[in-house]
Amino acid sequence: MAVREILHVGNPLLRERSRQVTRAELASVEVQQLIDDLVDTMHAANGAGIAAPQVGELLRIATIEVNANPRYPYKPRIPLTVVVNPVIEPLDDELVEVNEGCLSVPNMRGNVMRHVNVRVRWWDRHGVEHDEVRRGLTAGTFQHECDHLDGVLFLDRVHDTRSLTTWDEFERFHRAAFIERITEFVERVGS
Ligand code: ZN
């Protein structure tokens, strides 16, 4: 078990494209340890997800979990999911504007457009292949983590920079309206 240091925006490693993981690598002690470290680091930071490049490892691996998350209390629950070599494909053109933050972008949130319905294919930590549909805010969380594997941060997708806020000012000025809108969305779309 180890909580790793999280790299912050400005670190060039966050802008690299991470490489595919082979089955032999995935089975190795080192990569299994990295996955454990990602889970520990995500939990310690109350993240909804974390990707390997955020701890400086340029491998296509991310972990996702939402369970009454204090950073994002409106997000539907996601059981702990380890995604290796994920591929995301939008199922249609429906988009939703989501207010996001990121463990690698301290004290900043902003609005990005995310696909509402996506097909995601990945291997779990045991190399078992998954091919599933994710919807709503959960689909957005998968897109955010997969972006990290291509060196993309949510900041790059903020279409109106006037939506950028610190966490305190989000709470103070924007939280109520966002929660009202996104709660209606979650009730309509589900997770
Ligand atoms: Zn992030």
Image (cartoon, rainbow, N blue to C red):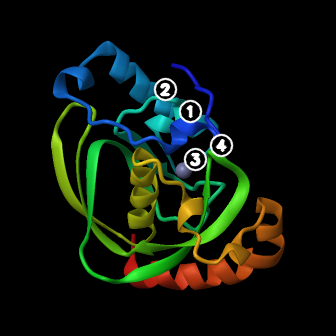
Front: mark 1 or 4: 4
Q: Which of disc 4 and disc 1 is earlier in sequence?
A: 4
The secondary element bearing badge 3 is classed as loop
Front: mark 4 or 2: 4
Residue 69 placement, left or right of 22: right
Reading the image, the residue beneath label 4 is: 10
Residue sitting at x 40%, y 29%: 35
**Callout 1 touching callout 3 (CB < 8 Å):** yes
**Callout 1 touching callout 4 (CB < 8 Å):** no
Q: Residue 123 at x, y = what percent?
A: 22, 41
Residues 68 and 162: in front is 162
The answer for how far apart the CA atoms under marks 4 and 2 are is 22 Å
Q: Is residue 166 above or below residue 7?
A: below
Mark 3 close to ligand 1, CB under 8 Å:
yes
The answer for how far apart the CA atoms under marks 4 and 3 are is 20 Å
Q: Which of disc 3 and disc 1 is earlier in sequence?
A: 1
The secondary element bearing badge 1 is classed as helix
Q: Residue 125 at x, y = what percent?
A: 28, 33
**Callout 1 touching callout 2 (CB < 8 Å):** yes
The 10 Å Cα crowd at callout 4, few under 14, some 14 to 19, many 20 or more, is: few
Name the amino acid, label 1: Thr
Name the amino acid, label 2: Asp
Residue 180 placement, left or right of 20: right
Residue sitting at x 20%, y 28%: 22
**Label annotation for residue 37:** 2
